[in-house]
Amino acid sequence: MLRGHPWVYANEVRELLAPEWDGRAVECRDAQGRILGSGIYNGRSQIVWRGFSTGKEDFGREYLSQALERACRRREGRKVGRLVWSESDGIPGLIVDRYGPVLVAQFLTLAVDRQGEMVLDWLQEALQPVCILLRNDAPSREKEGLAREVRVGRGVLPEAFWLELGGLEFYYEADSGQKTGLYLDQCEQHGRVARFAEGRDVLDVFCNQGGFALHCAKAGARTVTGIDSSAEAIGRAQKNAERNGLSIHWICENAFDFMKRQKPESRDLIILDPPPFAKARDRVQEAMKGYKELNLRAILQLRPGGVLATYSCSHAIGYERYREMLADAAADAGRRLRLLEICHQSADHPVWLNMPESEYLRGYVLEVL
């Protein structure tokens, strides 16, 4: 906290406040009585205080209106993408994503939930969406003492529709799919990786709804295979390929089982974009074993000159540790890796340097020699 981190845990305070302070803004002071800033408090949460200002502020209409306006102005012109991202935009626990005419919001802290109607009013007036859907189904709400739900906050939820994203059309249904319907944090990477696809045999592992696979097929890949264990995701991916007139082979299977059966030097481009293997620091060692197994098998499958695009969305695993794992995997495979690019989450998911948790998506694009 003294270095600007916005969280204070329950075991770091002398005593908890009375329950009536839950969901309200309070000042935080250090052991010498110096004010560290204003934050939202919840004694029922492991994170009892989440800072939103270094000054004295109330978490009310005036502050929230200004913070929302700043966040949306930073993303001005985006038709699809993240508009508000929690602490990175000064509103801990609020996520707002735009999918064309539909906004999808998540209220993940008690304080934001209590200000929910005000937030919905502001979004409706400022952005004029046809609907604001509340996807308050994240498990983290339970840690704040909140129930999980999905409901319409404003407007009327439209039927599923086709959404233009990166020059391709994606089938979008706001009340289903992961997170708020699509993974927006990788959108910028889809096109960057597709630059290596022309004339190549491509494998997209953990393909979800096909973001990487679709862009690679559009870029002129010779063959494209996408694999995911979710039948729902594969179904969406098939719809997307058909809509865009692209030929892709989709497989619904566990990725680890699939990778074990593949022949050496059978691909030219492999994308590994798994879900988080380590959601907490005590799972990092176990997670690294999984990452190494996947990357080792991918390296063996790539022909000389092939490209590996590999990612981790486990915030507890930094670039250096992931890079060391890749070096170990290359050594075990008897291959060399040349660094082409270091990858980050999309710019609409900004990183706050004082909060390492805000930088959670990391990756490397590598040439296998």
Image: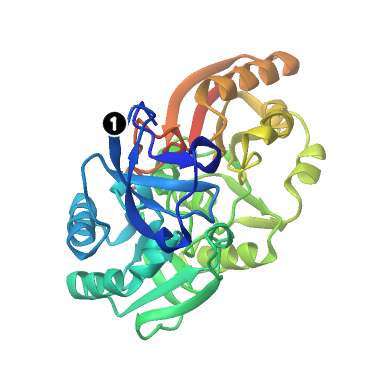
Amino acid at the residue labelled 1: Arg
The reply, left or right, for residue 183 in relation to residue 276 is left
125 or 218, nearer to the observer? 125
Q: Mark 1 sits on what residue?
A: 34
The reply, left or right, for residue 111 in relation to residue 286 is left
Residue at point 74%, 29% (across, down): 289
Residue 139 seen by the camera: yes
Residue at point 24%, 53% (across, down): 71
300 or 84, nearer to the observer? 84
Instruction: In the rendered view, tell whether residue 182 sits above or below residue 220.
Output: below
Q: Quadrant of residue 117?
A: bottom left
Q: Quadrant of residue 300?
A: top right
- In the rendering, at what x and y percent does residue 52 appear? 30, 46
How many residues crowd mark 1 within 10 Å: few (<14), some (14–19), many (20+)?
Answer: few
Residue 77 seen by the camera: no
Secondary structure of the residue carrying tag 1 is: loop
Q: Quadrant of residue 287?
A: top right
Figure disc tally: 1
- In the rendering, at what x and y percent does residue 20 appear? 42, 63
The reply, left or right, for residue 120 in relation to residue 17 is left
Residue at point 43%, 41% (across, down): 189
The reply, left or right, for residue 209 in relation to residue 28 is right
Way the structure is coloured = rainbow
Q: Quadrant of the N terminus?
A: top left
Instruction: In the rendered view, tell whether residue 248 sits above or below residue 263.
Output: below
97 or 69, nearer to the observer? 69
- In the rendering, at what x and y percent does residue 84 appear? 32, 55
298 or 291, nearer to the observer? 291
- In the rendering, at what x and y percent does residue 270 appear? 60, 37
Instruction: In the rendered view, tell whether residue 82 sits above or below residue 367.
Output: below
Instruction: In the rendered view, tell whether residue 208 sits above or below residue 47.
Output: below
Q: Quadrant of the C terminus?
A: top right
